[in-house]
């Protein structure tokens, strides 16, 4: 997106993303995965970061509330009419992939 010319309009989903990740009641809480424990063994809080964060190395000063492109896309698709069941299925597939990558590579970065 950063390489696009300035005159190309961009879709701002920041409000939708914030609502989906901080409101457990919204869309049946599919973006809040309390089954995934953090590196310290604690459950995620409703404002937890992206489900991909355990695989991402975060430098000093990195934003901890970033979401993945997949999660942002699902938020947009939900706003356009994707069912919660379909969105939940996609997110669960991504969670499974993250868990398998962690198991196979041993990579786990603190959330």
Image (tube, helix red, strand yellow):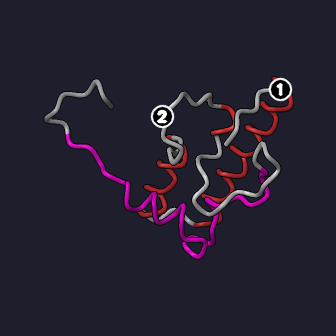
Q: Nearer the viewer, residue 91 or 109?
A: 109
Magenta region includes residue 8: no
- Res 86 seen here: no
Between disc 1 and disc 2, the foreground one is 2
Residue at the (77%, 27%) spot, across then down: 107
Q: Would residue 65 be found to the left or right of residue 42 on screen?
A: left
Disc number placed over residue 61 in the picture, else none: 2
Q: Which residue is mark 1?
A: 106
Residue 23: give x, y in percent of width and height.
54, 71
Q: Nearer the viewer, residue 1 or 18?
A: 18
* SS at mark 1 in the image: loop
Check the image and name the residue furthest to the right. 103
Check the image and name the residue furthest to the left. 7
> In the rendered view, would you say 33 is above or below 84?
above
Residue at the (80%, 32%) spot, across then down: 102
The magenta span reads: 9-37
Crowd around label 1: few <14 · some 14–19 · many ≥20 (10 Å):
few
Check the image and name the residue furthest to the front. 60
Residue 55: give x, y in percent of width and height.
68, 32
The Cα atoms of the two marked residues, 1 and 2, are separated by 24 Å
Magenta region includes residue 24: yes
Residue at the (45%, 60%) spot, across then down: 18
Residue 34: give x, y in percent of width and height.
74, 61
* SS at mark 2 in the image: loop
Comes first in the chain, label 1 or label 2: 2
Quadrant placement of the N terminus = top left
Crowd around label 2: few <14 · some 14–19 · many ≥20 (10 Å):
few
Q: Would residue 94 be found to the left or right of residue 73 on screen?
A: right
Residue 56: give x, y in percent of width and height.
62, 31
């Amino acid at each position: 997106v950063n390489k696009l010319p300035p005159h190309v309009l961009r879709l701002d989903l920041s409000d939708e993303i914030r609502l989906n990740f901080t409101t457990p009641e919204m869309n049946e809480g599919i973006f809040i995965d309390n089954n995934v424990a953090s590196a310290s063994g604690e459950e995620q809080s409703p404002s937890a970061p992206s489900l991909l964060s355990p695989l991402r190395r975060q430098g000093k000063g990195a934003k901890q509330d970033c979401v993945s492109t997949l999660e942002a896309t699902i938020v947009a698709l939900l706003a356009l009419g994707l069912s919660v069941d379909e969105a939940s299925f996609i997110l669960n597939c991504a969670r499974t992939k993250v868990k398998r990558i962690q198991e196979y590579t041993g990579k786990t970065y603190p959330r």
